[in-house]
Image: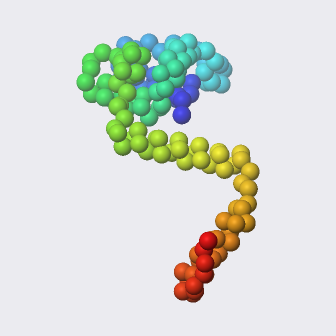
Amino acid sequence: MVITLEQTAALLSRIQIAYPAFVNIFEEDDYGNVVNAPTAQLWQQRLSANGITIEQAVHALDKHIDTSQFEPKIADIINNKPQLSIYDIQAQERQQEQLALLEYHESNEVIPMPDHIHELLERLENKRTLGGEDNLE
């Protein structure tokens, strides 16, 4: 899921707490609602364009806070995105295949089994369960 503007604003607030020199420009209305946040808008736009989720951004920020004395730039968060393991990639592929199959079943009409196949299956089932001698030609 793509990072939202509200999540980005919270991320920038966290940066400001960790790095007091970080400038987070925003304007609030009389009720305390953010009405103009150009810094958050730019960060949100760039993080979203690079497919960064809030979880990935927070993870990258935590790692940056632990290793750097200077506030992060957008590139620091984007480039610190954790690499997916082969297992994560395979799980994503399986999920995409299941979703594609589900979409196929929901969008396509299923036709009934042909009579000759149905009769053959019945004879095979009878032979297997009853041990009967049936000609399957």
Residue 107 appears left or right of 22: right
Front residue of this view, candidates 10 and 110: 110
Residue 111 in the image, given as x and y percentages of width and height: 73, 56
The part of the image, by quadrant, that contains residue 71 is: top left
Residue 61 appears left or right of 38: left
Above or below: residue 94 compared with residue 63: below
Above or below: residue 35 compared with residue 123: above
Residue 28 in the image, given as x and y percentages of width and height: 61, 18
Placement of the N terminus among the 4 image quadrants? top right
Res 40 visible: no
Residue 77 in the image, given as x and y percentages of width and height: 39, 22
Front residue of this view, candidates 42 and 97: 97
Above or below: residue 54 compared with residue 78: below
Residue 15 appears left or right of 34: left
Residue 31 appears left or right of 89: right
Front residue of this view, candidates 123 and 90: 123
Q: Residue at x 52, y 14 (%)?
A: 42
Front residue of this view, candidates 86 and 72: 86
